[in-house]
Image: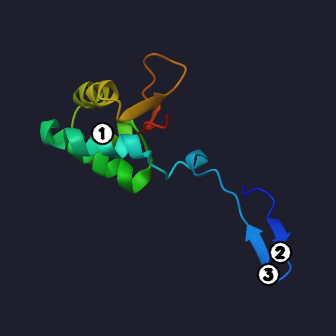
């Protein structure tokens, strides 16, 4: 939700200001995260690159969705997600340690 619009009358014109906290949107990728992806791209394996492509398209994915889409075992995907997390590209959103329904998305902060 956007903040209430602000208007300022300068005498000769009216200035309308619309404020939006972009970092609250899940579609937004932090510049630091994007730069990290670019810097590490040559070191990433094929599966990690495909996970990143999938996240560019969907913004959020689960372990099961990735495994099913790539036709790989959940353990293979888990290992790749762990490395992407260590590279500070992705973050895992769940309270549980072994939650196969945990959401994975680009690092947001």
The x, y position of residue 64, in whole percent, is 37, 36
What crowding class fits label 2: few (fewer than 14 Cα within 10 Å), some (14-19), or many (20 or more)?
few
Say what secondary structure mark 1 lies in: helix
Residue position marked by numbered label 2 in the rendering: 10
The x, y position of residue 36, in whole percent, is 30, 39
Residue 107 visible? The answer is yes
Give left or right: position of 7 versus 72. Answer: right
What crowding class fits label 3: few (fewer than 14 Cα within 10 Å), some (14-19), or many (20 or more)?
few
Q: CA distance from mark 1 to mark 3?
A: 43 Å
Residue position marked by numbered label 3 in the rendering: 13
What crowding class fits label 1: few (fewer than 14 Cα within 10 Å), some (14-19), or many (20 or more)?
some
Residue drawn at x 66%, y 56% is: 20
Q: Quadrant of residue 12?
A: bottom right
Say what secondary structure mark 3 lies in: loop
Q: Nearer the viewer, residue 66 or 45?
A: 45
Residue at the extreme front of the image, as rendered: 11
Q: Nearer the viewer, residue 89 or 101?
A: 89
Say what secondary structure mark 2 lies in: loop
Residue position marked by numbered label 1 in the rendering: 36
Q: Quadrant of residue 16?
A: bottom right
Q: Which mark is residue 97?
A: none
Query: In the rendered image of this protein, does residue 85 appear above or below residue 55?
Result: above
**Earlier-in-chain disc, 1 versus 3:** 3
């Amino acid at each position: 939700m956007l903040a209430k619009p602000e208007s300022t009358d300068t005498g000769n014109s009216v200035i309308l200001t619309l404020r939006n906290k972009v970092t609250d949107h899940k579609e937004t990728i932090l510049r630091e995260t994007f730069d990290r992806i670019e810097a590490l791209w040559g070191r990433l394996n094929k599966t990690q690159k495909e996970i990143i492509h999938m996240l560019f398209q969907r913004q959020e994915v689960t372990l099961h969705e990735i495994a099913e889409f790539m036709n790989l075992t959940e353990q293979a995907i888990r290992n790749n997600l762990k490395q992407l997390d260590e590279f500070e590209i992705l973050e895992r959103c769940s309270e549980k340690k072994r939650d196969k329904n945990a959401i994975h998305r680009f690092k947001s902060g």
